[in-house]
Amino acid sequence: MECGVPIVPVTIVGTHYAMPKNRFAIKPGPVTVIFHPAIEPAAFGSREELTENVRSAIERGLPKGYGETILNH
């Protein structure tokens, strides 16, 4: 927020299957990277509001049910 530069949220889907937790081997598989529209920090009154907006943008790029399972661990 202090720098005032736009933040570009990025959603990465598929890495959980390509490299599950507690595994060192990487399996081939599709991975999708989604770049969301830039968010201007000046549009938010607090760091918490900005953080929630960025997190929400990232979660919108996840398949249904995926965010609850992966992001909360």
Image (spheres, rainbow, N blue to C red):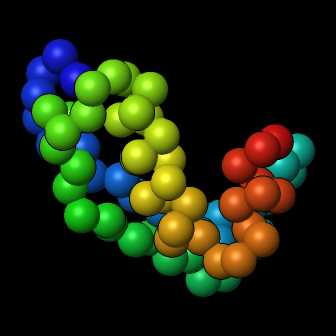
Front one among 43 and 66: 43
Residue 8 x/y as whole percent: 27, 52
Front one among 1 and 13: 1
Q: Is residue 24 visible?
A: no
Residue furthest to the top in view is 2
Whether residue 49 sits left or right of residue 56 in the image: it is: left
- Where is the N terminus found, in terms of image quarters? top left
Residue 48 x/y as whole percent: 44, 26
Residue 26 x/y as whole percent: 72, 63
Identified at 56% across, 60% down, the residue is 59
Compared with residue 49, is residue 57 higher up or lower down, i.e. above or below?
Answer: below
Q: Is residue 9 visible?
A: yes
Front one among 22 and 14: 14
Whether residue 5 sits left or right of residue 46 in the image: it is: left
Whether residue 46 sits left or right of residue 4 in the image: it is: right
Identified at 50% across, 76% down, the residue is 32
